[in-house]
């Protein structure tokens, strides 16, 4: 194999039924110059065996094992300490890359010299005995379409909606000492805004890069918002991301985030709060909404009532 130009950090815990699809999506890439760090975060199922089988069949895979579960943030940080290529990216072990993802991302960032490049993504939803890919959601499209090269968060505030780690490839030296928060859920939201505000230039492309799995058993973190502890991590991540944008004086991006949070995040949270047996849940949601209203940028927000109805969740 030629020398790799990009390393993918692929963490997973107890995903033996999903990991083969993630691994196959890497092997199907039209750009073959990659390596992947498969990080087994304390799995108690056969995830480690799946990872080791992949590594024995293809030397581009390397397996790293956490003896006990440390969380997604810690697993990604373990991978970041092992990067020796100029470009890095992430793929959660229960998701899938589209076949041309690495070709498009590496080609773009090589041509432009930007700090990172971000693409679009779609949901993989349960359908019958398997999964089917949905459409690009409105906020993802606003962040990535049309293509913009060497832009920034001031000129393209809608990019702030792209708050996931795995839709991007970054230059390794751009990360410096930046690391994911550990011991919390939604660890990538604040990091994403730090990438946006630190970058002197970034690229966005409309291509679908990742198919993001909505698990049929409801076991993913994003499907667990009815848990009070998960809600608190979720709201902390939203607060933290907004604060990063405010400190950077990216006021239009703050307004864009408020718009989207009101349309996409608050509606389902308020629905859960209305029936949740613990009054603390509703109190947390109400307090967060009050914080949004108190922000100076809230006066410029124009929530779109049609956006929530358009979301195909």
Image (tube, helix red, strand yellow):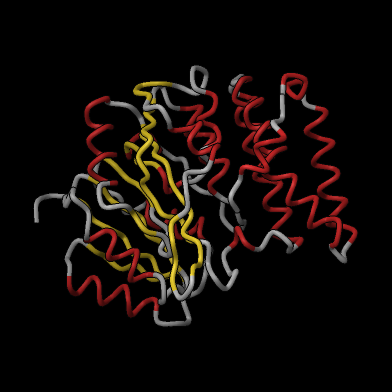
The x, y position of residue 1, in whole percent, is 9, 56
270 with respect to 190 (left or right): right
Asked if residue 298 lies left or right of residue 169, the reply is right
Left/right of residue 131 with respect to residue 290 in the rendered view: left
Q: Position of residue 158 (x, y in %)?
A: 54, 28
Examine the rendered structure and indicate whether residue 146 appears above or below residue 131: above
User: 199 or 182, which lies in front?
Assistant: 199
Residue 225 in the figure: left or right of residue 245: right
Asked where in the image residue 227 lies, by quadrant, the reply is bottom right
For the image, the number of numbered tags is: 0
Q: Which residue lies most toward the right here? A: 279
Q: Residue furthest left?
A: 1
Q: Where is residue 69 in the image (x, y as percent from the top left)?
A: 52, 71
Q: Which one is in front, 30 or 305?
A: 305
Residue, x 22% and y 61% (percent of image)?
Answer: 27
Q: Which residue is drawn at 22% across and 59% down?
A: 28
């Amino acid at each position: 194999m030629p020398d790799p130009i990009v390393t993918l950090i692929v963490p997973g815990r107890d995903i033996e039924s999903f990991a083969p699809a993630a691994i196959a999506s890497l092997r199907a890439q039209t750009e073959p110059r990659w390596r992947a760090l498969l990080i087994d975060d304390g799995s108690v199922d056969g995830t480690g065996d799946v990872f080791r089988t992949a590594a024995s069949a293809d030397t581009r895979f390397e397996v790293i094992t956490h003896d006990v579960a440390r969380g997604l943030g810690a697993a990604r940080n373990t991978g970041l300490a092992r990067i020796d290529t100029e470009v890095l990216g992430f793929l959660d072990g229960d998701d899938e890359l589209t076949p041309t993802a690495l070709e498009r991302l590496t080609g773009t960032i090589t041509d432009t010299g930007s700090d990172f490049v971000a693409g679009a993504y779609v949901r993989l939803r349960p359908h019958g005995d398997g999964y089917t890919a949905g459409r690009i959601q409105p906020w993802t499209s606003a962040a990535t379409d049309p293509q913009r090269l060497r832009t920034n968060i001031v000129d393209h505030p809608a990019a702030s909606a792209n708050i996931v780690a795995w839709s991007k490839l970054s230059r390794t030296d751009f990360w410096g000492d930046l690391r994911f928060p550990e011991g919390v859920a939604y660890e990538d939201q604040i990091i994403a805004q730090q990438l946006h505000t630190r970058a002197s230039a970034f690229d966005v492309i409309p291509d679908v890069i990742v198919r993001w799995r909505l698990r049929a058993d409801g076991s993913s973190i994003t499907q667990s918002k009815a848990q009070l502890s998960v809600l608190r991590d979720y709201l902390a991540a939203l607060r933290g991301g907004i604060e990063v944008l405010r400190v950077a004086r990216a006021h239009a991006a703050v307004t864009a985030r408020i718009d989207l949070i009101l349309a996409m995040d608050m509606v389902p949270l308020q629905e859960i709060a209305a029936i949740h047996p613990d009054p603390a849940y509703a109190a947390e949601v109400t307090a967060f909404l009050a914080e949004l209203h108190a922000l100076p940028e809230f006066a410029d927000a124009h929530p779109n009532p049609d956006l929530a109805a358009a979301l195909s969740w």
